[in-house]
Amino acid sequence: MKIKLPDIIPVFPLSGIIYFPKTNLPLNIFEPRYLALINDCMHSNKYMGIIQSKRNSSDVYSVGCLGKITENTKTKDGRILVNLIGVTRFVIKAEINNDKSYREFEVTYEKFKEDLDQKKELSRKIDQINKLSEKTKVFFKKNGLLLNWKEFEKLDQDQRINTLAMIAPITNEEKQTILESVNIQSKTKTLSEIIEFYLYDNSVNKITLQ
């Protein structure tokens, strides 16, 4: 059955946070405007968008990810703790002029329709993804990052790429580039090239410093 997704969504802009389909994102909501956003979501379809805001600006990137609230807990001090599960990426068409305290956008999901295709064949890309995982292990170790690789390998191929992209110590702009890559092949290629650059750059620096 085809999922009916909203054409207009409330959006939570976050700097430095990249959010992908099939990943969980816990949020600690305390600002009044975003408390209003969450309350409105809970009384409608529970969908909200997460998008990265640009540096030193109120502008946002054109691509973000739609999430659905799966858990929400109100705390005694007035905060709301929520968990989002990523559904699909979207492209902004236009901002909606509203009288609410938070921003809403008209969006389209057409460019990233593979995000919702549960039957897509990923097995032929397992080799490339496994190679990326091995490369990432070296990269993470050099940066002192720990990851439970045994649990990580239980994820499906798409979730692996999305998770690595979210937690990798790379720039916000590089993460946004991965987010905007249309399919798993292009995401894998982009992330692999970025990690190779950092590994190569570190090795050259070491040689230069000797």
Image (spheres, rainbow, N blue to C red):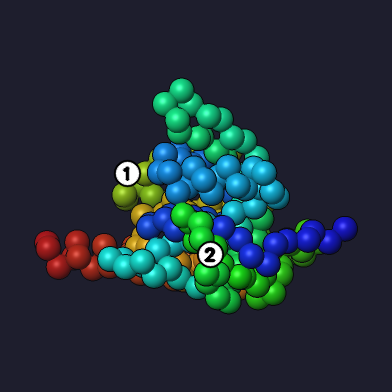
Image-quadrant location for residue 104:
bottom right
Q: Quadrant of the N terminus?
A: bottom right
Measured from the top left, where is residue 100 in percent x and y?
51, 57
Q: Determine the residue located farthest toward the top in the rendered image.
A: 76
Residue name at image x 59 percent, y 35 percent: 72
The secondary element bearing badge 2 is classed as loop
Measured from the top left, where is residue 48 in percent x and y?
59, 54
The secondary element bearing badge 1 is classed as loop
Using the image, determine if residue 78 lies above or below residue 118. Answer: above
Residue name at image x 66 percent, y 55 percent: 87
Within-10-Å neighbours for mark 1: few <14, some 14–19, many 20+: few
Earlier-in-chain disc, 2 versus 1: 2
* For residue 66, side relative to residue 35 (left or right): right
Q: Quadrant of the C terminus?
A: bottom left
Residue assigned mark 2: 98
Using the image, determine if residue 181 lies above or below residue 51. Answer: below
Q: Determine the residue located farthest toward the front in the rendered image.
A: 99
Measured from the top left, where is residue 93 in percent x and y?
58, 76
Measured from the top left, where is residue 187 in percent x and y?
55, 68
Asked whether 68 or 86 is in front, the reply is 68
Residue 138 seen in this snapshot: no
Name the mark on residue 144: 1
Within-10-Å neighbours for mark 2: few <14, some 14–19, many 20+: few
* Amino acid at dot 2: Asn
Residue 74 seen in this snapshot: yes
* Amino acid at dot 1: Gly
Residue name at image x 68 percent, y 67 percent: 7
| Dots 2, 1 in contact, CB < 8 A | no
* For residue 148, side relative to residue 48 (left or right): left
> Alpha-carbon distance for marks 2 and 1?
45 Å
